[in-house]
Amino acid sequence: MKRVYLIAAIIGFIVPTFFVVIESIATGNILLYTNPLATFNGMFANRISSIFAIDLLFTVLVFFIWSYKQSKKHKIKPVYVVWLLTLLFGLAGGFPLFLYLREKTIKNHLKL
């Protein structure tokens, strides 16, 4: 599963970032951070996008709590790096990256 998680992380970082780059070029809102008001307005432009935005934001919060607990349990060191990458590039890459690191750590402990 380690390899699957790593591939999912790579795809999860590349595919959404492709669309972010297109939006950044079109609007000048680099990585959707240089104009947070425009990003926020776009996220909550209508009820459907609001539903997706709230669902994603809540999921990221739950991921941060869960990954914190798992990182303590399995002694996964770079959890803050995963969080930073998640905040910068999204959950689609951050979550499988954490799963990859978790699998790697668990397998390394089993070998000992």
Image: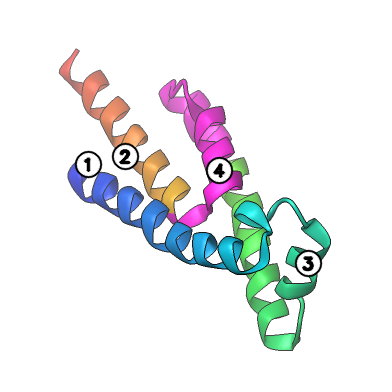
Instruction: Report the Cα–Cα distance between label 3 and label 4.
Output: 30 Å
> In the drawing, does residue 93 fall left or right of residue 83?
left
Q: Nearer the viewer's eye, disc 1 or disc 3? A: 3
Q: Amino acid at mark 2?
A: Tyr
Dot 2 or dot 1: first in sequence order is 1
Left or right: 97 in relation to 17: left
| 97 relative to 45 in the view: left or right | left
Quarter of the figure with the C terminus: top left
Q: Which residue is mark 2?
A: 100
Q: Secondary structure at mark 3?
A: helix
Provide the residue span drawn in magenta.
Answer: 66-92
Q: Nearer the viewer, mark 1 or mark 4?
A: 1
Residue 2: numbered disc: 1
**Where is mark 4, residue-wise?**
66
Labels 3 and 4: the sequence-earlier one: 3
Label 2 with label 1: CB-CB less than 8 Å: yes
Mark 1 or mark 4: whose residue is earlier in sequence: 1
Q: Are marks 3 and 4 in contact (CB under 8 Å)?
A: no
Badge number at residue 38: 3
Q: Amino acid at mark 1?
A: Lys
Residue 64, compared with residue 22, is above or below; it is: above
Residue type at numbered disc 4: Trp
The Cα atoms of the two marked residues, 2 and 4, are separated by: 15 Å
- Whether 85 is among the magenta residues is yes
Q: Position of residue 26 (x, y in %)?
A: 60, 69
Camera-side residue of 24 and 57: 24
For marks 3 and 2, give the CA distance.
34 Å
